[in-house]
Image (spheres, rainbow, N blue to C red):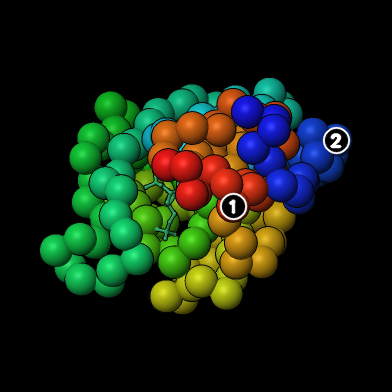
């Protein structure tokens, strides 16, 4: 698996340091409050696991699954909520957590869905942001790293379902695409 990696963009150490910083910022923002973390499956699992262990504020956890889709903006293929929350978000401080903000369509869809349920607040935290790819005005409140428009894997991000377990973020060798 490591032999499939062309270049490491973010090392384990880069990621560890940044998440420590994010934890401090989020703790400070929500001081004295309890939050509900909403993780978007599957990619955000790894980031969420590390982020919550860097938070001191009281929190609860819930998950949401949103349909995968291509680059199309066709409403037929727009993100759909496949499994919604177990928790009643009314009156709660919700923090949406995802691995990557790409077109922004997934986060915007989820943000609107949660906001319609009368939470006390809705904020978002993404591990990676590709601002060049944005198709709407969605902006994350906390971002781990802004990266160029390159296809990356690792730390929760996959290629055809693989490479999520890599502890760093990297690009793939062309041979991986050619052989799949
Ligand atoms: C990825 C990623 C985000 C979404 C971002 O999910 O996890 O949820 O795409 O893209 P967008 O900003 O263009 O909407 P994917 O559908 O690949 O599923 P996964 O989380 O299971 O990898």
Q: How crowded is mark 1: few (under 14 residues within 10 Å), some or many (20 or more)?
A: few
Pick the residue in front: 53 or 115: 53
Q: Position of residue 129 (x, y in %)?
A: 60, 60
- Label for residue 174? 1
Q: How crowded is mark 2: few (under 14 residues within 10 Å), some or many (20 or more)?
A: few
Q: With respect to residue 17, does 103 lie above or below?
A: below
Residue drawn at (24%, 61%), measured in percent from left and top?
78
Residue drawn at (32%, 59%), measured in percent from left and top?
70
Residue drawn at (38%, 31%), measured in percent from left and top?
63
Under tag 1, what secondary structure? Answer: helix
Q: With respect to residue 130, does 42 lie above or below?
A: above
Which quadrant of the figure contains the C terminus? top left
Q: Where is residue 106 in the image (x, y as percent from the top left)?
A: 37, 56
Q: With respect to residue 10, does 79 lie above or below?
A: below
Front position among marks 2 and 1: 1
Q: Where is residue 52 in the image (x, y as percent from the top left)?
A: 63, 28
Toward which corner of the image does residue 131 lie, by quadrant? bottom right
Under tag 2, what secondary structure? Answer: helix
Q: Can residue 160 be seen in this view?
A: yes
Toward which corner of the image does residue 39 lie, by quadrant? top left
Q: Position of residue 59 (x, y in %)?
A: 55, 27
Q: Name the residue under label 2.
A: 13
């Amino acid at each position: 698996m490591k032999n499939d990696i062309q270049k490491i963009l973010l090392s384990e150490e880069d990621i560890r340091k940044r998440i420590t910083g994010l934890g401090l910022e989020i703790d400070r923002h929500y001081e004295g409050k309890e939050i509900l973390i909403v993780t978007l499956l599957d990619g955000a699992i790894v980031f969420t696991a590390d982020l919550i262990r860097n938070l001191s504020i009281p929190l609860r956890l819930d998950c949401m699954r949103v349909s995968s889709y291509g680059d199309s903006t066709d409403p037929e293929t727009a993100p759909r909520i496949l499994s919604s929350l177990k928790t009643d978000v009314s009156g709660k401080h919700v923090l949406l957590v995802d691995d990557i903000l790409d077109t922004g369509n997934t986060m915007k869809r989820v943000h609107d869905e949660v906001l319609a349920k009368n939470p006390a607040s809705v904020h978002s935290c993404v591990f990676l942001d590709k601002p060049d790819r944005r198709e709407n005005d969605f902006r994350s409140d906390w971002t781990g790293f802004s990266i160029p428009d390159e296809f990356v894997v690792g730390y929760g991000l996959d290629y055809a379902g693989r490479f999520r377990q890599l502890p760093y973020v990297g690009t793939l060798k062309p041979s991986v695409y050619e052989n799949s």
